[in-house]
Image: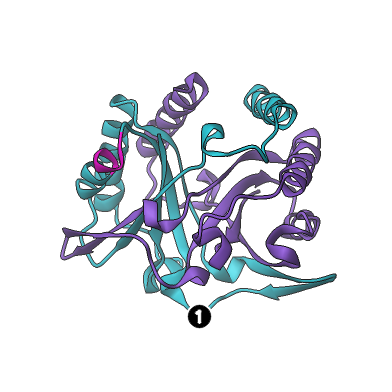
Chain colours: A cyan, B purple
């Protein structure tokens, strides 16, 4: 099963404060353990919301709102994608993350094809598989 | 430049409501256009927060809180990772998001991803090499699938 591990933003990430060399080193070590265990699939850090935007859809209307966004605790600062055998395994890995302050991290299970029902017809499943293969090839 | 396109959650996604066949069709068509344009790097949907958890660190000590979480608009229902030439291009792609999603009412957030060139000296050459190695190994794992 795959889990998205979402690191929430805080004042520092929103201010574009870089993590210390110590934190970068510890995070590097942690990421290496995740990779060696075959758990790590991907991971990215997000720049402050001042560099971002939101698009609100309402019927035919499209409204673009520029960042920054004030509700810091709602914002994402980064994420990992993990392959694990269970939610408990994901939680155990997450508890070992080198977070030292008051970080909040959310674990969310990814939808796999088998989780969908009839609305994802055999043709659509074929198409999805083809698209995912194409992405892998291009990257 | 890389951007994360975040589809915020709502009461329906949190209730585990499945997308209709039309929405799946439209979403795959949209993704296909982004892939053909060389824009789409990844994308997936997330299951409702009842299947998830949060870990809150206090002075580095972890405490686990099981889902579900009440504030749907604070949650993510799905995301894509895209490679584009500018923030404006990312916004233009997002405006083409399937119109029937969320019954025509949806909020999509666009956030720029940190790339190696965005970091300064604190991201030492050694760290950069290490990071490259980690990414390659992770990508291999991701391609290998289950």
Magenta: predominant secondary structure element? helix
Instruction: Tell me what residue is drawn at x 74 percent, y 40 percent.
Output: B28
| Residue A12 in picture, x, y percent from top left | 38, 70
Give me the chain letter of mark 1: A
Task: From this view, report whether residue B107 is shown above or below residue A139.
Answer: below
Q: Quadrant of residue A56?
A: bottom right
Q: Which residue is mark 1?
A: A70
Judge left or right: residue A119 versus residue B59. Answer: right
| Residue A111 in picture, x, y percent from top left | 51, 41
**Residue A73 seen in the current view:** yes
Element assignment for label 1: loop
| Residue B68 in picture, x, y percent from top left | 37, 62
Task: Look at the image and give the residue range highlighted in magenta.
Answer: A86-90
A2, A24: nearer the viewer: A2
Crowd class of label 1 (few under 14; some 14 to 19; many from 20; radius 10 Å): few
Q: Quadrant of residue A78?
A: bottom left
Residue reaching furthest to the bottom:
A70
**Residue A15 seen in the current view:** no
Instruction: Tell me what residue is drawn at x 48 percent, y 27 percent.
Output: B142
B109, B25: nearer the viewer: B25
Number of numbered discs on residues: 1
């Amino acid at each position: 099963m795959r889990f998205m591990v979402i690191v929430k933003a805080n004042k520092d990430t929103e201010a574009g404060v870089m993590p210390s060399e110590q934190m970068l080193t510890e995070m590097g070590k942690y990421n290496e353990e995740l990779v060696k265990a075959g758990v790590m699939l991907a991971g990215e850090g997000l720049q402050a919301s001042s560099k971002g935007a939101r698009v609100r859809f309402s019927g035919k209307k499209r409204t673009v709102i520029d960042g920054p966004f004030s509700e810091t605790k709602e914002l994402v600062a980064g994420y990992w994608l993990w392959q694990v055998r269970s939610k408990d395994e994901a939680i155990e890995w997450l508890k070992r993350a080198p977070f030292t302050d008051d970080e909040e991290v959310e674990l969310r299970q990814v939808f796999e094809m088998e989780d969908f029902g009839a609305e994802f017809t055999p043709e659509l499943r074929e198409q999805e598989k083809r698209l995912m293969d194409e992405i892998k090839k291009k990257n | 430049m890389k951007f994360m396109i975040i589809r915020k959650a709502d009461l329906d996604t949190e209730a585990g409501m499945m997308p209709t066949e039309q929405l799946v069709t439209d979403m795959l068509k949209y993704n296909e256009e982004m892939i053909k344009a060389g824009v789409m790097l990844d994308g997936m949907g997330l299951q409702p927060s009842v299947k998830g958890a949060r870990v809150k660190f206090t002075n580095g000590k972890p405490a686990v809180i099981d889902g579900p979480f009440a504030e749907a608009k604070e949650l993510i229902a799905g995301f894509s990772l895209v490679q584009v030439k500018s923030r404006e291009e990312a916004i233009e792609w997002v405006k083409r998001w399937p119109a029937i999603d969320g019954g025509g009412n949806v909020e999509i957030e666009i956030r720029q991803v940190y790339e190696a060139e965005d970091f300064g000296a604190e991201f030492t050459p050694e760290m950069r090499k290490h990071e490259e190695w980690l990414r390659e190994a992770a990508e291999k794992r991701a391609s290998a699938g289950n």
